[in-house]
Image: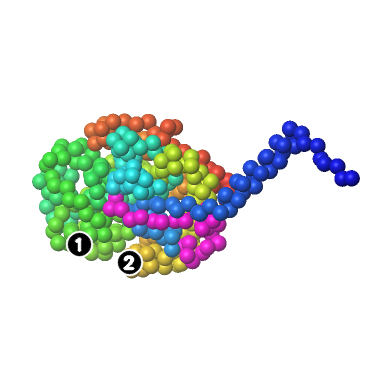
Amino acid sequence: MIGHAKTTPTRVAFLAGIALALAAWLTSASAEPLKLRIGWAQAPTQLTPLTAELMARHKELFRGKDVSYTLEPLRFQGSTPQIQGLASNQLDIAALGPSSFALAVANAHLDGRIIADLMEDGVPGHFITYWAVRKDGPVHTVEDLRHRRAAVNALGTMTDMILRENLRHHGVADTDYVVIEANFANMFAMMENDKVDVVPVMPQFNHDFEGSGRYRPLFHLNEIVGVSQVGMWVARADFIAAHRAALVDFLADNMRSVRWFLAPENREEALAIAQSVTKESRAALDYAFGPGDIYRSPDLLPNIQAVQKDIDQAVEMKLLPSRIVVDPGYVDLSLVAEAKARIDK
């Protein structure tokens, strides 16, 4: 006669543990990948839409794609419109600057976290954003912008904040000039057609301004704020808590992507991808991914000190309603740390 195994509390707990583990595995195996809706404003300065194209060409770089996550890049005019996207759960990761991040926390009451670097401006050895005026025009000094027209990509963005800060330092009040919101891609044509008197020049449009020979820098970003963390990825704290594993998978893949774009041996294909996404000419994109481009951290590490400095300067100028202390309450770099440890091991 075959006897029955004696059931003990230990055995019951052991079997229950196996059942729970199996259920968790089955749930994970059958779960749909997390759709990551990520905002971006301009390319190729922001690599998000280029990364989507690289995914199609080099699937081996993106080990978590279609397994734990999928990527949906969403285009915005600037950083401030993305605040509403985060607040309404229409956006999972926003590309914000320090001022728009402060507005998201102080005004929109978002419990946001800075999770990764996108780009830094003012870094020596890389392109530095400047504000261009006509060589033969009426603007020779910052004070000459009084009663003139200035273009920004969106109110409340870094280009808007830095312009206002510099003009105020030179005695030009906000009401002393006209601000016109425009897409960066249209600013050269606006200058050519005498629609505005000064515009910020991003690296992808520098070719047009320099090539024409008709424009000169009035001032550079680093003269006003030094090094600036002009772009960073921000996600809500509850979203991070709910989807941490998928986010680490994505950030590890994105770290591989950024390093791929920055590697000299990939330059020709990287430029071809930039052409495919932006529809710009090779000549216009020749600056990209080298010293003539804006700085990007290969480890996705944002400059948190620069974020705090930019916010403090904006508060001092009364460009922001209140100060926030960014670190540690609004920063979570543990995800990129885990991603880096995974791919550098």
Screen quadrant of the N terminus: top right
**Residue at 37% over, 64% down:** 277
Q: Amino acid at mark 2?
A: Glu
Look at label 1 and name its amino acid.
Answer: Ala
Name of the residue lying farthest toward the left: 147
Is residue 256 shown to the viewer in this render? Answer: no
Residue at position x 15%, y 54% in the image: 196
Residue 78 x/y as whole percent: 29, 50
Depth check, front residue: 98 or 237: 237
Considering depth in this image, is 295 or 53 the residue closer to the camera? 53
Circle 1 SS class: helix
Horizontal side, residue 119 vs residue 178: left or right: right
Q: Residue furthest right?
A: 1
Between 81 and 145, the one lying in front of the other is 81
- On residue 189, the disc is 1
Callouts 2 and 1 close, C-beta under 8 Å = no
Q: Is residue 61 within the magenta segment?
A: yes
The region drawn magenta spans 54-78
User: What residue occupies the far front of the structure in this picture?
Assistant: 1
Label 2 to label 1, Cα distance in Å? Answer: 15 Å
Disc ID at residue 284 = none
Magenta region includes residue 220: no
Please give the residue where the numbered disc 2 appears in the rendered image: 280
